[in-house]
Image (tube, rainbow, N blue to C red):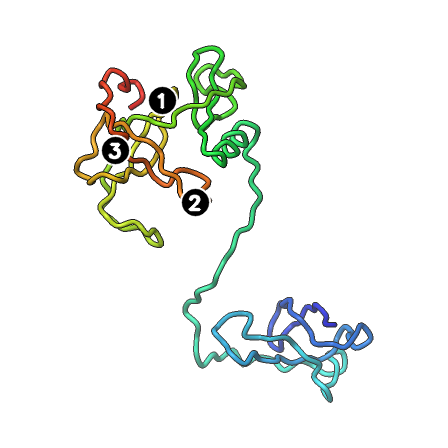
Amino acid sequence: PFAWVLVTLDGADTAILHALDAPGPEAVRTGMRVRVRWAADRIGAITDIACFEPHEGAADAADAGAAPHDGVFADAVTGIVAEARLDYTYSPGRAQTAYINALSERKTVGERCPSCRKVYVPPRGACPTCGVATTDQVEVGPAGTVTTYCIVNIKARNLDIEVPYVYAHIALDGAGLALHGRIGGIPYDQVRMGLRVEPVWTEGGRHPDHYRPTGEPDADYDAYKELI
């Protein structure tokens, strides 16, 4: 057993929350004197304080005044590096849930607007142009057409892809707008508008790893000019 306690260090005006090594509730009381137990390995973080422990033989704060700090710091800290983590739960909603579940089966599913008939991929649940709900699911692709693209020459951190490589807008067959995807299986300087491509999946992948040429003739510009 241990206790969570608020400890006001001698000379401080505010308390810190930390663990107190205590055998049970009867060993903890307000006003008791404690001291720091330092960790064996210290890196300049709050975890350098392993815990607090009762300061045996010291009078309680109610009986003895705390020693004031002289305000002099021998080694001033001018900056720290602290790790931070953000945990969250994301609920994508009905439309994107169907889209994500379809990807797990290596299918791409969009939704058609009942008014303008445009197929949105990924689906949004509503048509942003007409302002009406979309519920009619439509499987698109798997092949598609490169509408626009860029050549990436700067290697991203933690991304195991050699530069240069191509990132493109790809209009899947049957979709009313283009989505993003990396182009592989072809030299970067041979990628072009109108190139017909298909998805390449990796084992256990939840989405296509990249798109490669299908070998079909390039699409006519008029077939995709509205999707650029």
Q: Measured from the top left, where is residue 156 in percent x and y?
A: 31, 50
Compared to 102, does 174 lie above or below?
Answer: above
**Residue at the top extreme of this rendering:** 115
Tell me how many marks there are.
3
**Residue 57 lies in quadrant:** bottom right
In the rendered structure, the answer to whether residue 139 lies left or right of residue 227 reads right
Q: Measured from the top left, where is residue 109 in percent x and y?
A: 47, 26
Compared to 225, does 213 lie above or below?
Answer: below
Residue at label 3?
149
Residue type at mark 3? Tyr
In the rendered structure, the answer to whether residue 201 lies left or right of residue 84 reads left
Q: Secondary structure at mark 1?
A: loop
Q: Are marks 3 and 2 in contact (CB under 8 Å)?
A: no
Q: Nearer the viewer, mark 1 or mark 3?
A: 1
Compare marks 3 and 2 and give the one earlier in the sequence: 3
Residue at label 1?
173
The residue drawn where x is 33% and y is 31% is: 198
Residue type at mark 2? Glu
The residue drawn where x is 24% and y is 21% is: 219
